[in-house]
Image (spheres, rainbow, N blue to C red):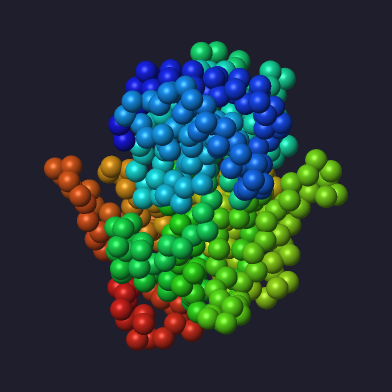
Amino acid sequence: MAAMSSDYSDRLFALLCGVQEYISRYCPSLISEGAPAAAAGREDAGTGELLRSYIEQYIRQNGADIPGVGRERVVERLYNEMAGYGILTDYLKSDDIEEININGWDDIALTLRDGRIVKSPERFFSPTHAEDIVRRLLRHSGMILDSAMPLSQGHLPGNNRVTAVKPPLIDEDRGVAVSIRLLHNSEIGLPEIIRSGMASAEMVSFLRLLARYGVSFVIAGATSSGKTTLLGAILGDMPSDKRIFTIESGARELSLIRRGPDGRVTNNVVHTISRPSENEKQNIRQEDLVVASLRYNPDIVCIGEMRDVEAYAAVEAAMTGHTVVSTVHSGSGEAAHTRIALLCQRKFPIDFSTSMLQAAEAFPVVVYCGRPEGHSRRVMDITECQSDYSGGTRRYRCLYRYELSPDGGRGRFVPAAPASPSLRKRLAEHGAPPGLLSQFPFDV
């Protein structure tokens, strides 16, 4: 993307001022300061067309075209400034963008769904302009960003997550810093995971085997490493008679319900979302939903992300024979158990070594996702942990890994070591056919 010149930005800002003055003189009712209905998808068609016609009329009467930019694009850009969220309007509607990061008024980075990060060719007009647009966006959801509340966190329409900060938490000349995570209903299946190079076909088949036949696992990695995408693809490939109960915090990223040609639901899924509240009696936490899920006789309990004391309930559920899958923020596969144990300590601060053993027992397999080359997502390794309660030890064996190329080129997926006999035994006990198990390496 080529960056727009400062001359373009200056011309556009001058045009905006002229258009606003023109409309204020001839049709002031079109100018409002509230949350714009247009950007929320609730605009009155007549009002929207009237606003566009006034913008076009002003440009035509004043010969105010911008050289090198089509009039239609200029009209749309001005319309978004007045009835939408400025340069954010199109990005918020895009199916190709996963995250919008405003680093400052003149620096916007876009994370695409394939993991690439590109800079926006446009910028806000000034730090004040950036803050005004972000405030408008936040007001739509009843969120406030001002000097008294310089940090604002919450959810926008469509379950999009947003975190915004302003001075004095950042430098005055930057305006605002905002992260907007666009949550798309995932249509990425296991074939797409393989085609994208995120994992090999054998790795994907192995993870599908675990989920289907009773082995709990956790997917670890940093933000935007593809954890939820991979988890959703695996669960989306489960047989229709598997009862899946999903638990997410505040917003739903997983979309697992399948429908037939007649519109009827063909699989067996319950999606739930926690409901935070300052009133303790109304506060429904992920932990509460984990406990409730066990009453639904689930084949698989999916916790979108373990980030607090729900980790303890997840460990308890997995250790009592339920299949639990989840994600966790962690810097490596082995570190995932440390992270889970630390979260469990928030609930019950028992001896830490015991918490570690419980975490490893609950989630014997850890999948670690990363972005090693060109921001492309990769399953960096799949690791099995064997716990010895009598000796209080844990032993990790890497089953699959992504091997980086020595010359910096594209790496490759390689099998590293066979899985343990105990893992094979557990899969067999949960109904995995011998013929299917024979497709994967296990120690004898």
Q: Nearer the viewer, residue 296 or 254?
A: 254
Position of 114 with respect to 132 (left or right) is left
Q: Residue at x 71, y 60 (%)?
A: 289
Q: Quadrant of residue 384?
A: bottom left
Q: Quadrant of residue 296?
A: bottom right
Does the rendering let one see residue 397? no
Q: Residue furthest left?
A: 407
Q: Residue at x 39, y 67 (%)?
A: 190
Q: Residue at x 79, y 49 (%)?
A: 283
Q: Is residue 145 above or below residue 342?
A: above
Q: Residue at x 49, y 60 (%)?
A: 186
Q: Is residue 397 above or below residue 299?
A: above
* Rendering coords of residue 135 (x, y %): 64, 28
Q: Is residue 282 above or below residue 429?
A: above
The quadrant of the picture occupied by the C terminus is bottom left
Does the rendering let one see residue 336? yes
Q: Nearer the viewer, residue 19 or 359?
A: 19
The quadrant of the picture occupied by the N terminus is top left
Give the number of callouts: 0
Position of 436 with respect to 267 (left or right) is left
Q: Residue furthest top?
A: 172
Q: Nearer the viewer, residue 99 or 406?
A: 99
Q: Nearer the viewer, residue 301 or 342?
A: 301
* Rendering coords of residue 372 (x, y %): 30, 44
* Rendering coords of residue 9 (x, y %): 42, 21
* Rendering coords of residue 31 (x, y %): 67, 29
Position of 255 with respect to 201 (left or right) is right
